[in-house]
Amino acid sequence: MKKIIILFCVALMACNQGKQEPPIEIADPKYIDLSKGVLIALCQGDLEGFIKPYSHNATYRWNYGDSLVGRKAIVDYWTERRNNVVDTITFKNEMWLAFKVNVPPKHMKPGVESLNPLHAFTLNT
């Protein structure tokens, strides 16, 4: 009888344990293509194409911790840079990784990230 009760309890516990979502996982490669399109638009000076997938409250981060908040701030920054500072932008030998953040650190929102070692995009999905 003890064995039946223990077996029943183990089975009950196993049923109650749902599949836990990992904190981070590889995302659909389609997000890499979306990110590449954004980067190509920026390189071509097409700021409308560049900003199109960004949400109105987007955060644009650099690897040294500085950031721009809001679509308007991002467009204003890049408009100034492309018109007065940067003549051309090119990238070579890029490597891309799309991942989904399920449990983000404080500075990130849940969602899909597409990462290029030189540039990271948070995608509005």
Image (cartoon, grey):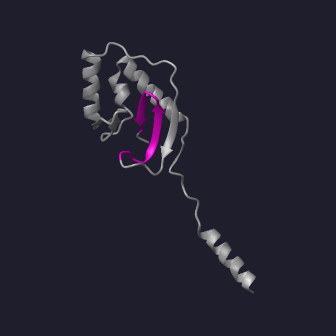
Q: Where is residue 100 in the image (x, y as percent from the top left)?
A: 49, 44
Residue 38, percent across and down? 42, 27
Q: Find residue 72 and report its image quarter.
A: top left
Farthest front residue?
64
Compared with residue 91, is residue 30 higher up or lower down, i.e. above or below?
A: below
Q: Is residue 29 left or right of residue 63?
A: right
Q: Position of residue 121 (x, y in %)?
A: 41, 34
Residue at point 42%, 33% (across, down) = 120
Residue 121 colored in magenta in the image = yes
x and y, in percent, of residue 37 in the image: 45, 26
Relative to 54, is 44 above or below?
A: above
- Which residue extends farthest bottom? 1
**In which quarter of the view is residue 13 placed?**
bottom right
User: In the rendered image of this protein, does residue 97 appear above or below residue 22?
Assistant: above
Q: Give the extent of the magenta segment.
A: 107-123
Q: Is residue 41 left or right of residue 82?
A: right
